[in-house]
Amino acid sequence: MSLPSPTTRTSSVLWSGPAIVACLAAVKFAFHMATAKLYGFFIDELYFLACGQHLAWGYVDFPPLTAFQAWLTRALFGDSAYSIRLFPSLAGAGFVLIAGAIVRELGGGRFAQFLAALVVLLAPGYLAFSSYLSMNAVEPLIWSGCALLVIRIIKRNDPRLWPWFGLLAGIGLLNKHTMLVFGFSIVVALLLTADRKLMFNRWFVLAGAIAVVVFLPNLIWEIRNHFPHLEQLANIKRNGRDVQMNPIMFLLWDVLMANPAAAPLWIAGLVSLLTGSLKRFRVLGLAWVIAYVVLILAHGRFYYLMPAFIMIIAAGAIAVERMTERAGRGWMRPAYASLIVLVGLLIAPITVPVLSPDAYVRFTELTHIKQPRFEHRQTTSMPQFFADRFGWQEMVETTARVYNSLPPEERAKTAIFGNDYGQSGAIDFYGPRYGLPKAIGGHLTNWYWGPRNYTGESMLVLGDNRESLGRWYEDVRPMAEIGDPRAMAQEHFTLFLAQKPRGWTLPQIWPKLKKFE
């Protein structure tokens, strides 16, 4: 009996499933780092960066984890685009790694691991999630990590792993409250299958307790502040800001975001989990269906379901691997992988900044492939997800030019008021390099930070109009025009200097300035 040579062992390791998956994860990380500076910061990023300077256990529209990431990455690596987008890029690489891990746990071989990792690497939705700092960059890691634990619990019949599920779910709740959707879906799916027996033990109870304890600081914050997130969601529903989709359109947009060429794969994965060769893990297939139904009933945005796709993509890769194992079908593997790559590359420019603005417009005119609309907001030449990355620094530069032109004694008492969190966040992020003070504003969590000792006797106001300001001030003067041609329509406005309040002070009227929408 002869042992394999070191060269053979090294070659075997390099061509193993985990090694291939790791290479694809490295490619995804490198891609996001290489494209990090092509466009400016996204509107939400500016808001999260501002929140990172006010660390708390909660914010109006999101839990604390993203703000903590914003604080941490700036503290460690500074304010560059590479720093701000480092954690999302790492999370994107994590999507690829965990897809491979789920395939291995489900019994898939090298090709299945490669295929699942490739689909996740090129899925337009995951490319978008990993291109900017947000809750969405972390959520697929949490959901798929929980799915991996469920697989191991079922496979090993070992409920002692439930506490790890609880810990991960608790962290997920600190990242985004939609973790409740996945947790609920898993519990209901377990109850609907014979695997319910895995719930009736102290380990499952302990998992629930751990999740509650981890989430408790944010829950207490929500209670103490009268659940501002629910107030915001009610306001959004009332004003009709979000685009509502029927169940078919909801799913069709997810088909696009998961790569249309991959639809046969993940559908095969879902069927395999529900009724096929992987039905031992039917809980995951049922959880996906339940999450879909819950999000439809709750009028969630279509991309809220994307974190649940990794587990059915993994199952689908195994289905494809087994289907192509038969003699004469080997050609299908490179052919299908090539199709995934071609379609993924074709759609990528609509979800991640890889083209210049002019090239993007030409691309959409040529291909007729466009970004889905998820809000009723007026765009310009660029779609919302890209338009919200333009004009912020130029806005701050113009504001600084006006602010610094004021006499010193007037400048000292002049506040800069932003009417949306992007305007306020941009002032807070870019302003210090131009000598600007922190902004004030009533939009979302900015309202909690108050008027910052300003009386309101003099304000530079962004994103408002003369008529509205005239009801509050005797003297309203236009100072400059602001608006990048590629930015959203609401970011095109006149910068006003408002002075001589009509019988009020800012602390007195601050409660009326709250805008949770």
Image: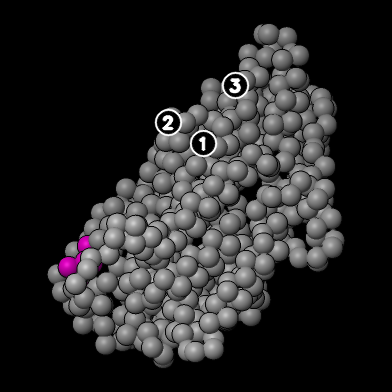
Q: Do the residues labelled 2 and 1 touch (CB within 8 Å)?
A: yes
* Label 2: few (<14), some (14–19) or many (≥20) C-alpha neighbours in 10 Å: few
Image x and y of residue 370, in percent: 75, 63
Q: Range of the magenta residues?
A: 159-163
Left or right of 59: which side holds 481? right
Secondary structure mainly formed by the magenta segment? helix
Q: Are marks 3 and 2 in contact (CB under 8 Å)?
A: no
Could you tell me the amino acid type at mark 2? Leu
Could you tell me the amino acid type at mark 1? Ser
* Label 3: few (<14), some (14–19) or many (≥20) C-alpha neighbours in 10 Å: few
Q: In this view, does 461 lie above or below 26?
A: above
Residue at figure coordinates x 34%, y 77% from the top left: 107
Tell me the colour scheme of the image. Answer: one colour
Could you tell me the amino acid type at mark 3? Pro
Residue beneath disc 3: 432
Q: What element carries label 1?
A: helix
How far apart, in angstroms, are the residues tagged by discs 2 and 1?
Answer: 8 Å
Image x and y of residue 467, in percent: 81, 38
Decide whether residue 365 is among the magenta residues.
no
Residue beneath disc 1: 83
The one of 502 and 249 positioned closer to us in this rendering: 249
How far apart, in angstroms, are the residues tagged by discs 3 and 2?
Answer: 19 Å
Residue at figure coordinates x 46%, y 85% from the top left: 325
Residue beneath disc 2: 76
